[in-house]
Image (cartoon, rainbow, N blue to C red):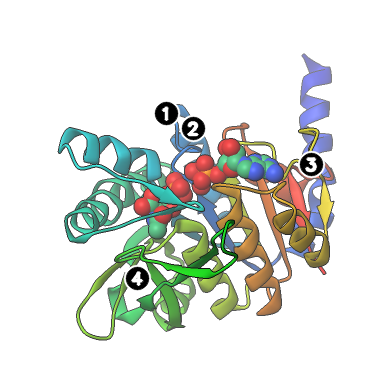
């Protein structure tokens, strides 16, 4: 038993250099819909976020909820498809997306953090004009004719202006902001933003020290399915170009490239289902997942 206490004490002591390194840092954490798989995962995540704040690391949570949106759309018999990791979003779909993300999921996370003794405040990108969007455009080369086609994703938003003042106000008052990836258009439109894209835009605007993208795989994998622990932006572009990175991993890695270009210190893609993934990444030498930095 005494040995266990010693091991715990040693772990705490070993955290000191990391606590010093991240003292006062801003860390944007994207909590994906797959990572919040059950109540226990949600509780562990909330506890890690509260511990970060207690250690004077300032977390900003941006969440997803793709699987939960799918469930609701199925219940309402609304069909849905994805193109390169982004949901084609018509008017009926965007109403459901806003309801699920800014309503149920946002409040579940806020409550989970508050249950652990934190002070979380839920927002969407509409609050205080946090994320202003334009309609996202997507082009794809037709393999037969080699001609670029413009694909219509509907109300999928591309952030064009981020106003993080509201987040800074909350952080300075010791609140933990929890942001749903819903954007506002300049003409009253509501936009569905991919959660990774929203997290990257916020991390860039806040010049965050770290962006953690929590997902349901260990990180970025190579052609043989083995985890790649370190990547540079050039290497990421190669993997995107040769198709090694596909589907939902495309917005994550594109987000990483954009965030680093905008001055975010580093981006980590890691398995949010693994217990205490955020704590291991920030406060121990056992970094988890794939670290992307220049
Ligand atoms: N090279 C790759 N490495 C890891 N995952 C990949 C890769 N290419 C595609 N993927 C897929 O991307 C998925 C993660 O994206 P997504 O399901 O959208 O996650 P989340 O819901 O957490 O945002 C993985 O489950 C995997 O199927
Ligand atoms: C445009 C777009 O694809 N938006 C996403 C928003 C939620 C999300 O990103 O959820 P995950 O992080 O759990 O995948 C969607 O409609 O599913």
Give the label on residue 125, or none: 4
Q: Earlier in the sequence, mark 3 or mark 2?
A: 2
Circle 4 sits in a helix, a strand or a loop, which is it? loop
Distance from label 3 to label 2 (Cα)?
27 Å
Q: Which residue lies at the image location 41% right of the left edge and 47% below the top edge? A: 113
For the N terminus, the image quarter is top right
Circle 2 sits in a helix, a strand or a loop, which is it? helix
Distance from label 2 to label 4 (Cα)?
25 Å
x and y, in percent, of residue 40 in the image: 46, 28
Distance from label 4 to label 3 (Cα)?
34 Å
Residue labelled with disc 1: 38
Nearest-to-viewer mark from 1 and 3: 3
Q: Are marks 2 and 1 in contact (CB under 8 Å)?
A: yes
Q: Which residue lies at the image location 49% right of the left edge and 32% below the top edge? A: 41
Distance from label 1 to label 3 (Cα)?
29 Å
Distance from label 2 to label 1 (Cα)?
5 Å
Q: Is residue 282 depicted above or below 12 in this figure? A: below
The residue carrying mark 3 has its beta carbon less than 8 Å from ligand 1: yes
For the C terminus, the image quarter is bottom right
Q: Is residue 164 depicted above or below 88 in this figure? A: below
Choose between 137 and 57: the one closer to the eye: 137
Q: Earlier in the sequence, mark 1 or mark 4?
A: 1
Q: Is residue 34 depicted above or below 153 in this figure? A: above
Q: Are marks 4 and 3 in contact (CB under 8 Å)?
A: no
Nearest-to-viewer mark from 2 and 4: 4
Residue labelled with disc 2: 41
Residue labelled with disc 3: 222
Residue 276 in sight from this viewpoint: yes
Q: Quadrant of residue 289?
A: top right
The residue carrying mark 4 has its beta carbon less than 8 Å from ligand 2: no
Q: Quadrant of residue 33?
A: top left
Nearest-to-viewer mark from 3 and 2: 3
């Amino acid at each position: 038993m005494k040995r266990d206490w010693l091991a715990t004490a040693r772990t705490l002591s070993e955290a000191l250099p990391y606590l010093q390194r991240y003292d006062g840092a801003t860390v944007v954490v994207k909590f994906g819909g797959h990572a919040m798989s059950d109540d226990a995962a949600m509780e562990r995540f909330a506890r890690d976020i509260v511990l970060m704040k207690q250690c004077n690391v300032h977390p900003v949570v941006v969440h997803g909820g793709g699987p939960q949106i799918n469930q609701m759309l199925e219940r309402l018999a609304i069909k849905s498809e994805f193109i390169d990791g982004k949901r084609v979003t018509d008017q009926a779909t965007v109403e459901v997306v806003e309801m699920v993300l800014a309503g149920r999921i946002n409040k579940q996370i806020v409550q989970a953090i508050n249950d652990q003794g934190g002070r979380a405040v839920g927002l969407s990108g509409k609050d205080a004009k946090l994320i202003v969007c334009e309609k996202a455009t997507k082009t794809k080369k037709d393999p037969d004719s080699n001609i670029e086609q413009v694909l219509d994703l509907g109300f999928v938003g591309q952030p064009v202006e981020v106003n993080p003042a509201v987040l800074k106000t909350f952080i300075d008052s010791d609140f933990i902001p929890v942001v749903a990836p819903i954007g506002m258009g300049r003409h009253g439109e509501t936009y569905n933003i991919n959660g990774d894209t929203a997290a990257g835009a916020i991390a860039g605007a806040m010049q965050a020290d770290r962006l953690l993208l929590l997902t349901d795989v260990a990180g970025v994998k190579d052609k043989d399915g083995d985890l790649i622990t370190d990547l540079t932006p050039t290497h990421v572009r190669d993997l995107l170009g040769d198709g090694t990175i596909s589907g939902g991993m495309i917005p994550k890695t594109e987000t990483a490239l954009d965030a680093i270009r905008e001055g975010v210190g580093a981006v980590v893609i890691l398995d949010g289902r693994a217990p205490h993934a955020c704590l291991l990444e920030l406060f121990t030498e056992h970094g988890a997942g794939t670290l992307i930095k220049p």
